[in-house]
Amino acid sequence: MFGKKSSALSLKKRHSKLTNQAEVVKRRKYVHKEDLMLAKYFRMHEFDWKKVAEKFSNRTPIMLKNRYYLFIRKNDLLQKLLDEVDEYEKDGKIVDEMGVEEGPETGDSDDEGLRGSKDIESMESSPSDESTSVTQNGKKGGLS
């Protein structure tokens, strides 16, 4: 829309159309079952997020990609989740049919459901970069 000005009426119609869509997905916390499913289908489809998202009812491909990169990969949890999936499914059960109450809730970008994990606790307690320090105003500063 270069060079064109939108009228107030057209902007109002477009806004109304976008906000009234039935496919608007609300943000909500991830449950452990969703992390297991994400790991399982990531193993099958790898980086084809649209195929992975087909297995989820209320998650978009972007939401799943962000969850993978910002939580699972960042905290190196993929192998642990895959091991848990294999352990659960070896008895003929399917992770997709697991009840939500069987797994702890995990936060959108934090580790609420994994508080007992020693790996997560050690990451929280030790700084990742020894050469930086926090100044009084809260900003990181390097050694001079």
Image: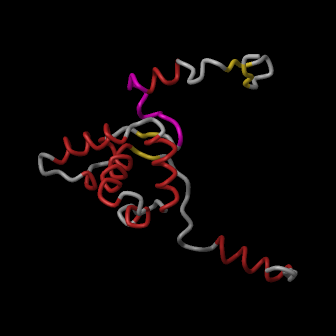
Taking the magenta stretch, the answer to whether it contains residue 89 is no
Question: At 46% from the left edge and 59% from the top edge, which residue is drawn?
Answer: 59
10 is higher (above) or lower (below) than 52: below
Quadrant (top left, top right, bottom left, bottom right) of the N terminus: bottom right
User: Quarter-wise, where is residue 42 in the image?
Assistant: bottom left
Measuring from the top left, give residue 121's x and y in whole percent: 46, 22
In this picture, residue 69 sits left or right of residue 91: right
Q: In the orientation shown, which residue stands out farthest toward the front?
A: 144
In the foreground, 119 or 92: 119
Residue 5 placement, left or right of 88: right
Q: Is residue 93 above or below residue 119?
A: below
* Residue displayed at 65% across by 19% down: 131
Identify the residue at image location x=74%, y=80%: 13
Residue drawn 45% across and 35% down? Answer: 75
Q: Is residue 56 left or right of residue 8?
A: left
- Magenta includes 113? yes
Answer above or below: position of 62 versus 73: below
User: From which residue to which does the magenta span run?
Assistant: 109-119
